[in-house]
Amino acid sequence: MDEVFKALADASRRRLLDGLNARNGQTLRELCAGLDMARQSVSKHLAVLEAANLVTTVWRGREKLHYLNAVPINAIADRWINRYDRRRAGALADLKTALEETPMTDFVYTTYIRTTPDRLWEALTDPAWTKRYWGVELESDWKAGSTVTWRQFGVTVEDPEQVVLESEPGRRLVYTWHTFTPEFGESVGWSAERLAELAGEPRSTVTFDIEQVGAMVKLTVVHGGFVPDSAVRAAVSEGWPALLSNLKTLLETGETLPEQEGQ
């Protein structure tokens, strides 16, 4: 957490985060265009932000896109803002709020977990694991083209288009998001109008990239393919930070996080 505070202490780095907060997924060239700084200086500042896990990168073809990572900000907010005087932590609270409210095409989250790539892969694909930190049993042989069965709240969701798109054990997993069926909607208390709104959108896609970094494993999650002002994006964005924190805690301690009041 010290690295996060040090990274945020520099005004230029805060401006870079503001730029990504306004429009996520920018290239180095695009970020340089919005700042009165040399390309080399911007690169150095981005390296500091990446080291602090405040910025994560995703390659799209030959382009390296930079995304604001909300995980450390949420961790700071949970540890400090909720425990101490909010007036003194107003800047962090405002940044956390902006992260949660800024409309983005893709959601990109990066976290570092003290585990192994194989163990993390198992946690992402074994239904006994996913049920513990997610509350969902995901069943598949996890080969490209295979279907994924989603079991949650006593409801089984199966669909020919609910499939694995890419599968490299211990490295990368991509699959399409689950189908919003009437049974699933009823299990979570959605109205018919809410279900129709969500089911009417194109199916989104989730990507898990796994990378060994020293004694840690870097997990980058990209949930994308949303339409502008997507209701699905708004619905899932609240769940990813808590889900990833729960996954990290389970792998590192053997226990999940305690349930919050109201959940």
Image (spheres, grey):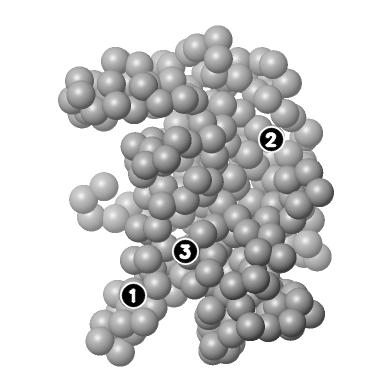
Q: Would you name the residue on which mark 2 appears?
A: 173
Closer to the chain start, of discs 1 and 3, is 3
Please indicate whether residue 125 sits to the left or right of residue 263 in the image.
right
The nearer-to-camera label among 3 and 2 is: 3
Q: Residues within 10 Å of mark 3 (few under 14, many from 20)?
A: some
The nearer-to-camera label among 2 and 1 is: 1
Q: Picture quarter containing residue 30?
A: bottom right
Quadrant location, the N terminus: bottom right
In terms of secondary structure, where does tag 3 sit?
helix
Please indicate whether residue 108 sits to the left or right of residue 226 in the image.
right
At 28% across and 21% down in the image, what residue appears? 196
52 lies above or below 158 = below
Choose between 28 and 180: the one closer to the eye. Answer: 28
Q: Would you name the residue on which mark 3 appears?
A: 22
Residue 256 percent coordinates (x, y): 46, 51
In terms of secondary structure, where does tag 2 sit?
strand
The answer to whether any part of residue 230 appears in the image is yes
Spatial CA distance of label 1 from label 3 is 17 Å
The residue sitting at the top extreme is 160
Q: Would you name the residue on which mark 1 appears?
A: 93
The answer to whether any part of residue 3 appears in the image is no
Choose between 235 and 103: the one closer to the eye. Answer: 103
At 72% across and 28% down in the image, what residue appears? 166
Q: Residues within 10 Å of mark 2 (few under 14, many from 20)?
A: many
At 23% across and 55% down in the image, what residue appears? 261
